[in-house]
């Protein structure tokens, strides 16, 4: 073809070279966006700032707890745990336990881990070097989760780690990317974060039915939900007073949303916006009536990615610039494709492991230590009663004084508070332990041993030390059963709770008690 060298008046415009259509690799994992497509620059900006706040809340709560939980004189020392891993799996220890605490798990190392997490979270909130900030915050949080043992057995920890990893591919590059208009989100990263949002809901609905729990079949699951959760709120007390019809309706709504309406995320825009609004209202209700740490906040902000920029503009946000031309480097696309495809495959087979041949489970099994491709399922079986473990100490073995908790129910006259997204992991774990025997949760006995020794790091997990730094003669753990009071009792007495002492939960110990070797911090590893 011969091109016209110059244009004169009335001469036709020379033909312009047309850009080649992007490959499938670019369409899925690059920054390409066709004309007229939905753009998610504001959604991404809001999501990443919110994710930074959630990471910040996680590290903030660890700042007050990490030494008492997994410090050298804590309840479950991380150093002892890592020594066991190294002894049992010398060639695989770094993969099976991916944590920076292999470099050291003393008090200074734990403090440094929290400080680094703080800084990275703050940088993410400030939109400074978001990819690097996300990577550092995710690795720091994974380092804690890997070494925290019983104190990181929550689904919310896996949710945050998965969101942190996937967001690395969503975030724009650069030191100060602002809205990141030159690097719009890739389709794959946006879709996989929506996929996480969908799975949290849908898999939770599936396990409710699969568990066979009659509470869900008879729509009575919410009748005692507000008083039996790990950390109720004072608004939960008022919700508990509502009639059964309200509770049955909310139980039915939960099943309808989790099993049915969440599928709207895969339908056209108007349906996505509708389920985003409904899910937001649902999560706000849960946040106000229960303290599930950052779990509901994370699910809430994942829903931001269902809303495109056209919707944000109608709410007063500035219009976003047009999509740029150009393609990212091929090696980046290949790396993103490999990582995201691996995570997606692992989440699929993890949901239906019994239907997948064992060799095909290997990619999912390899990712399990990293908690970035998770299987979810919340409230499969509803708790039918509320039990509370209380630690007590004595100077003479006759008169016993309770160690006061900061957040969990204890004094019947004290109103339950709203603490989320702060997560008191020690008190959360006591709620789980109360549903089984101390033999199932031997760390309760380890807590008794630390209280008997008046370990400062463990005492800081409580609201106060009734012995003011002195060692008690004996320590024990007792079990109470708690119920919310009704309106008449609350008006008459001012009490939020009524309780009944059931007896000892774990054995009473003193200096003459012979404890298992693994209970003692720094004990030799067998």
Image (tube, rainbow, N blue to C red):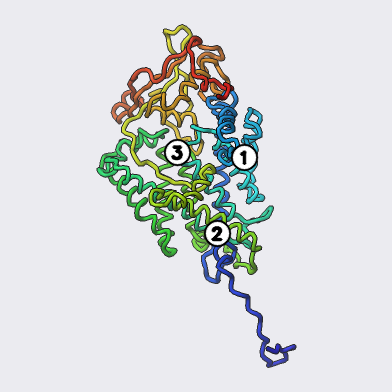
Q: Is residue 387 above or below residue 13?
A: above
Q: Is residue 462 visible?
A: yes
* x and y, in percent, of residue 492 in the image: 31, 24
Q: Is residue 110 above or below residue 163?
A: above
| Residue sitting nearer the eye, 373 or 323 | 373
Give the number of the disc on residue 117. Answer: 1
Residue bearing mark 2: 317
Give the number of the disc on residue 257. Answer: none
* x and y, in percent, of residue 291 in the image: 44, 37
- The answer to which quarter of the image holds residue 402 is top left
Residue 277 relative to residue 310: left or right? left
* x and y, in percent, of residue 212 in the image: 29, 42
- The answer to which quarter of the image holds residue 240 is top left
Density class for disc 2 (Cα within 10 Å; few <14, some 14-19, many ≥20) is few
| Residue sitting nearer the eye, 333 or 278 | 333
- Considering every residue shown, the one lying at the far right of the view is 5
Q: Is residue 434 above or below residue 504?
A: below
Viewer-nearest of labels 1 and 3?
A: 1
* x and y, in percent, of residue 342 in the image: 53, 54
Which secondary structure lies at badge 2? loop
Which secondary structure lies at badge 3? loop
Lower sequence index among marks 1 and 2: 1
Q: CA distance from mark 3 to mark 2?
A: 31 Å
Which secondary structure lies at badge 1? helix
Density class for disc 1 (Cα within 10 Å; few <14, some 14-19, many ≥20) is many
Give the number of the disc on residue 292. Answer: 3
């Amino acid at each position: 073809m011969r091109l016209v060298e110059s244009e004169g008046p009335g001469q036709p415009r020379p033909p312009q070279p047309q850009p080649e259509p992007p490959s499938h690799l670019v369409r899925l994992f690059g920054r390409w966006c066709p004309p007229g497509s939905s753009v998610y620059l504001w959604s991404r900006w809001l999501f990443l700032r919110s994710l930074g706040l959630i990471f910040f809340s996680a590290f903030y709560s660890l700042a007050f707890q990490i030494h008492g939980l997994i410090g050298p004189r804590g309840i479950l020392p991380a150093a002892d745990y890592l020594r066991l891993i190294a002894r049992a799996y010398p060639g695989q220890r770094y993969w099976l336990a991916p944590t920076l605490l292999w470099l050291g798990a003393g008090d200074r190392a734990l403090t440094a881990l929290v400080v680094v997490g703080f800084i990275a979270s703050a940088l993410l909130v400030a939109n400074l070097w978001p990819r690097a900030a996300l990577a550092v915050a995710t690795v720091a949080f994974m380092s804690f989760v890997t070494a925290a043992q019983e104190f990181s057995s929550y689904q919310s920890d896996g949710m945050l780690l998965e969101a942190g990893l996937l967001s690395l591919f969503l975030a724009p590059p650069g030191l100060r990317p602002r809205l990141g208009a030159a690097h719009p989100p890739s389709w794959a990263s946006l879709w996989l974060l929506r996929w996480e949002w969908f799975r949290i809901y849908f898999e939770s609905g599936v396990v409710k039915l699969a568990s066979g729990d009659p509470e869900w079949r008879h729509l009575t699951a919410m009748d005692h939900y507000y008083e039996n959760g790990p950390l109720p709120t004072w608004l939960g007390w008022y919700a508990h007073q509502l009639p059964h019809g309200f509770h049955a309706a909310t139980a039915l709504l939960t099943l309808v949303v989790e099993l049915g309406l969440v599928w709207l995320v895969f339908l056209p825009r108007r349906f996505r916006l509708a389920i985003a609004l409904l899910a937001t209202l649902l999560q706000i209700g849960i946040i106000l009536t229960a303290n599930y740490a950052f779990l509901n906040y994370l699910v809430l902000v994942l829903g931001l990615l269902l809303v495109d920029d056209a919707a944000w503009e109608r709410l007063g946000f500035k219009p976003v610039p047009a999509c740029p031309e150009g393609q990212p480097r091929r090696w980046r696309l290949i790396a993103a494709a490999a990582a995201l495809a691996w995570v997606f495959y692992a989440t699929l087979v993890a949901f239906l492991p019994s239907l997948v041949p064992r060799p095909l489970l290997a990619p999912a099994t390899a990712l399990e230590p990293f908690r970035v491709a998770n299987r979810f399922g919340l409230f499969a079986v509803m708790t039918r009663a509320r039990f509370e473990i209380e630690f007590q100490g004595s100077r003479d073995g006759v008169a016993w004084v309770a160690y006061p908790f900061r957040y969990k129910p204890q004094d019947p006259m004290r109103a339950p508070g709203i603490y989320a997204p702060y997560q008191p992991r020690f008190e959360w774990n006591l709620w789980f332990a109360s549903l089984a025997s101390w033999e199932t949760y031997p760390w309760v006995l380890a807590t008794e041993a630390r209280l008997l020794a008046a370990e400062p790091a463990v005492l800081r997990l409580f609201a106060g030390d009734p012995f003011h730094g002195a060692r008690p003669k004996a320590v024990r753990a007792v079990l109470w059963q708690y119920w919310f009071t009704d309106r008449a009792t609350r008006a008459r007495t001012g009490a939020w709770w009524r309780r009944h002492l059931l007896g000892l939960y774990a054995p009473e110990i003193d200096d003459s008690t012979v404890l298992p070797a693994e209970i003692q911090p720094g004990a030799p590893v067998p």
